[in-house]
Image: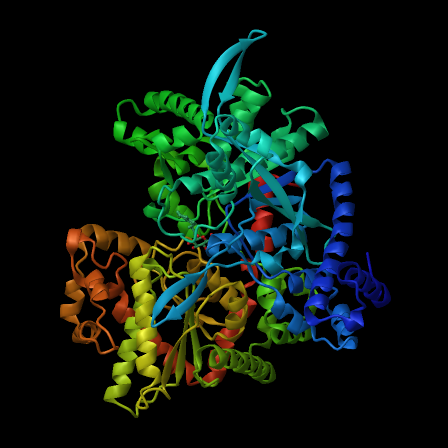
Amino acid sequence: MTYKNEELYRILEDACSNNFGCDLKDASRLQVYKSLCQTVRYILSKKRKLFHDEINSNKSKQVYYMSMEFLIGKSLRNNLFNLRLEDNFREILNGLGFNIDDLYEIEPDAGLGNGGLGRLAACYMDSMASLGIPGTGFSIRYEFGIFKQKIVDGWQMEFPDDWLSLGDVWLRPRTEDSYEVKFGGYVTESYEDGQIKINHHDYSPVLAVPYDMLIPGYNSDAVDKLVLWSAKSPSPSAINLSFFVRGEHLKALEQNTMAEVISKVLYPADDNWDGKRLRLKQQYLLVSASLQSIVSSHIKKYNTLSSLPDKVAIHINDTHPALCVPELMRILIDEHNMGWDEAWEITQKTLSYTNHTVMSEALERWPENLFKELLPRVYQIVSEINRRLLYRLNSEYHNDMAKIEYMSPLSGGEVKMANLCLAACHTINGVSKLHTDILKSSIFKNYYDLTPERFTNVTNGIAYRRWLCQSNPKLCELLSNLIGEGFKKDCMELEKLMQFYDDASVIESLQKIKYDNKVKLSKYITDANGINVDPSSIFDVQIKRLHEYKRQLLNVLQIIHMYREIKFNPNIDIPPRTFIFAAKASSGYFMAKQIIRLIVAISNTINSDPMVRDKIKVIFLEDYKVSLAEIIIPSAEISEQISVAGKEASGTGNMKLMINGAVTVGTLDGANVEIHEQVGNENMFLFGLKANEVEALWHSGYNPLYYVSKNPELNEIMQMLRLSVFGASFEDITNSLLTNKFGAADAYMNLADFDDYVRAQNEVSKVYKDKDHFTKMSLVNIAKSGIFSSDRAIKEYADNIWHIK
Ligand code: 26V
């Protein structure tokens, strides 16, 4: 479908007069913005209809991506870019006296996720649509997304994110396609026509109402969709009558609000599984409603469920939707009278699972009692899965009870969600080569030994059309001029940039673009923090969730060391650097919040010290989110990827920074290993212990005090932190690094990697003095980043896991 500007104008005008009863030329900025969104949504719906008809008539296999999080960010610019209508609307709006870039600002981020896992899901939707794969994402329509972060006196404060007030332009409810989800109650069995029938009594029903968000692909006929479930209480007569007739009116009302609370707010933690009842309810709402809708549309189309695995692939994004395993069994057995064995075979062949973390505290386990009370029928099915598995494991491992317990979905009074996935899914994957190796050799070793053929790797990728083409338009334009437009569809074409390695004018253009982007970020920093930074200083960026394993603290220790060097030698010859941090901490994560406090404290001290502030500055930008990342990343020169080796499953910020020309300072962790494979030692600043060395050191008895005694500089830095040099004492932090309570001090080995990190940072300063050389490193990073496109990742999922043609 191609549109002429006159036609687009007419649709825009209709949207304006239908919604606001006024002419475009009289409309306010907000009215024009809303009309534009409506127009884009209208164009997408028409396209979606054609695509839907086509996949229905071809009977194509469908992918369903189940995820508790989709960190979408803003949609307007991405939709226009993918539809290739941005220039048309820019012109139309100019004619009306509006700048389209100003309108983009109005849109709130859809922050329906915490971090990497949620953003990955959003990138994957984009790539599925761009590759023409019929894909549907399923998640929850949280009324409040990830909290808004403000920093008050160094402390993170959290405020509700009421994104729907403007963000709901992209969502269309389909109330008629709602499903009932049952919580609580009890289960009985009866015989009917010689068959066992399951009866679920006295449950509390909740209605799951779907809202569709359309996802266009780039230069593709496909329009996929994201379906977000909203929890509603069923009609008052259905839910409340039993309480009403007993005179319990308040309780009846309470039930109503209890139902709707389920989709109120995204859980703002990604570190610590806490076994909260409401989260289990959210997970079951998502899983049950989605599977009911998948099964019912399959039956409608094919009139049988035996073909489900041929026509449907359901992907479990981390363990959060692991209830897919027992719920699909329940639907097949209880609602479609299937026998256990057939249902199990179909379930296995339909489901696949990606693991996104090896951190044991993030692996979800539910107290058995809570699980049984909230989901009595699902619990029975989990018990039966467990019983049958134990039978098999017992014959395999005889009396190795420890091993069998470790592998069981139900043991020690807990339901273990990862084990449910491992027991059932036909394919299990990690998200980088190293991470998959660790799954195989460590946390999932037992399952790997049993069925190695089920394990595979798909290294993460990013929707680079958002992260490069849209957020860094000048670089995108330069690339188009140099290597043609082909890279927008095939990211591997970026490699053609290598031919300009020795081209001085290209190096100069890259420098100019980076500088302009740094000026833009500097303006943002001045507005947001009231601090002026020097756009010709090195922009050194660490942006990601705040986690001890990601080691923002190591960066801080190194900055304090630099600060001390400058204090001792004010004439030291190092290129000026601006360290930029942005990070949200989970609301209940004490140490993470202390680390934010420390970053803010050192930034206050350093930025106000006339002796050092022309050499280094430290900026903490509040409220890190997708749209802020889009501003920071194009201006970054150094990408800090400094997690302790073995802990960061992949990382995707590393890829976004790389494709924008930032050079990585990093450990051999997650996808850094593969970045290193691409660019080599010469184009990256590697440091630190390797994953196997970290393991070995931990087991041989890691002692942080050894590093402090060996290195007087580290000792001094610890003293400064204790002695309120930065405005307050940070004893909780020094204790976490040094006090070897329960052998757990400095669990992320900051001190073991300190020296080598300082060496790598000195190397950065040295190399940067030869600006052209540094820019060549940057060029290589851009040229070699093609492999980290989510198009490549999705192709691998489609070929090796979902088996989509
Ligand atoms: C875990 C939990 C644990 C319990 C409470 C709620 C909650 C919410 C989210 C998570 C997800 C943690 C896993 C995660 O985000 N992993 C990240 O996944 C990225 C995409 O694969 C990857 O690049 C990062 O390295 C990995 O940390």
* Location of residue 313 in the rendering, given as x and y in whole percent from the top left corner: 59, 37
Q: Residue at x 41, y 80 (%)?
A: 578
In the image, residue 386 lies at what x, y percent? Answer: 39, 25
Residue lying farthest to the bottom in this orientation = 571
Q: Residue 289's image quarter?
A: top right
Q: Is residue 549 left or right of residue 541?
A: left
Image quarter of residue 17: bottom right
Q: How many discs appear?
A: 0
Where 128 sits versus 444, above or below? below
Q: Give the quarter of the figure containing the C terminus.
A: top right
Find residue 418 and report its horizontal and vertical position in percent: 40, 38
Q: How is the image coloured?
A: rainbow
Residue 759 falls left or right of residue 78 = left
| Residue 348 is at least partly visible in this image | no
Relative to 161, is 508 above or below?
below
> Can the viewer see residue 573?
yes
